[in-house]
Image: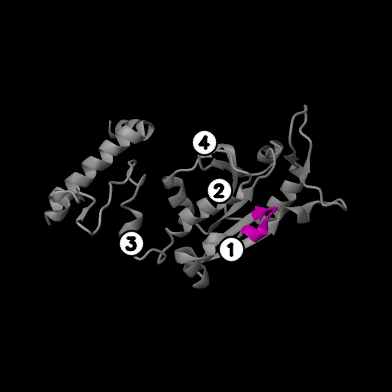
Amino acid sequence: MSFAATILTLYPEMFPGPLGISLAGRALEEGKWSCETVQIRDFAQDKHRTVDDTPAGGGAGMVLKADVLARAVDHALERHPDSPVLAMTPRGKPITQARIRELAAGQGVTVLCGRFEGFDERIFEGRPIEQVSVGDIVLSGGEPAALMLLDACIRLLPGVMGAASSGTEESFEEGLLEYPHYTRPVEWEGRTIPEVLRSGDHAKIAAWRKQRAEDDTRLRRPDLWERHWGARD
């Protein structure tokens, strides 16, 4: 059974986009996953196909209408009732690698892409939608975030990555940033590959990588380090 990705968007031409090349593109051709776009505007019921309106209480911008969104979400749920619906929004909970693994292990995912000032909040009260964020940034729409989320899922599908270990020895898999990598030439601009990595001693290499992962996480991502250290207690 392939992983079914359904994207609810005002810009379906953005998909599969970069997911149509490289590993994800080859997996798409091989049927390991499928990509279906749903035009949100198709669920508007007025002659102008209106999907947004001015914010209640005043303010700049426009807000996506709950009634239109609900009809689009209902359509997706009818087609894929077992797929979770995720809305890409900076107001959401930060997505994690652990959650990505859960999604990739399932039958697929429906992704709701926002635009303008975002969603009428009532859509989250009226439908089972998980609000997720890809970081403390604001994009022009949810589509780039959806591409990021789907790429993270697709690469974990069976048979997509060349080496099975590629998906487990990475940043966030153990609650830490990944250790640094090196390759030939041994010397470049006076900088050499660390001697331990050229030693052939696998135990020492593993210990060095673990230590560098911990050191880099502690220095660069103290939030991750605090969670990692707390999980060990």
Which residue has dot 2 on it? Answer: 145
- Seen from the viewer's position, the closer of residues 27 and 20 is 20
* Secondary structure category for the residue under label 3: helix
Give me the residue at 69% from left, 38% from top. Answer: 117
Going from N to C along the chain, the mark reached first, 3 or 4, is 4
Which x, y percent locates residue 128?
63, 44
**Mark pair 4, 2: CA separation:** 12 Å
* Secondary structure category for the residue under label 4: loop
**Vertical side of 112 occupied by 184: above or below:** below
Going from N to C along the chain, the mark reached first, 1 or 4, is 1
Which residue has dot 3 on it? Answer: 164
Going from N to C along the chain, the mark reached first, 4 or 2, is 4
**Mark pair 1, 4: CA separation:** 27 Å
- CB contact under 8 Å: marks 3 and 4: no
**Mark pair 1, 3: CA separation:** 24 Å
- CB contact under 8 Å: marks 4 and 2: no
Going from N to C along the chain, the mark reached first, 1 or 3, is 1
Residue 129 visible, this angle: yes
Magenta range: 8-14
**Mark pair 2, 3: CA separation:** 25 Å
Judge the density around disc 1: few (<14), some (14-19), many (≥20) Cα neighbours within 10 Å.
some
Decide if residue 165 is on the left or right side of residue 59.
left
Q: Amino acid at mark 2?
A: Ala
Residue at the front extreme, as displayed: 189
Which x, y percent locates residue 133?
54, 41
* Secondary structure category for the residue under label 1: strand
Q: Give the quadrant of residue 159.
A: bottom left
Which residue has dot 1 on it? Answer: 35
Residue at the top extreme, as displayed: 57
Q: Amino acid at mark 3?
A: Ala
Q: Amino acid at mark 1?
A: Cys
Which residue has dot 4 on it? Answer: 136
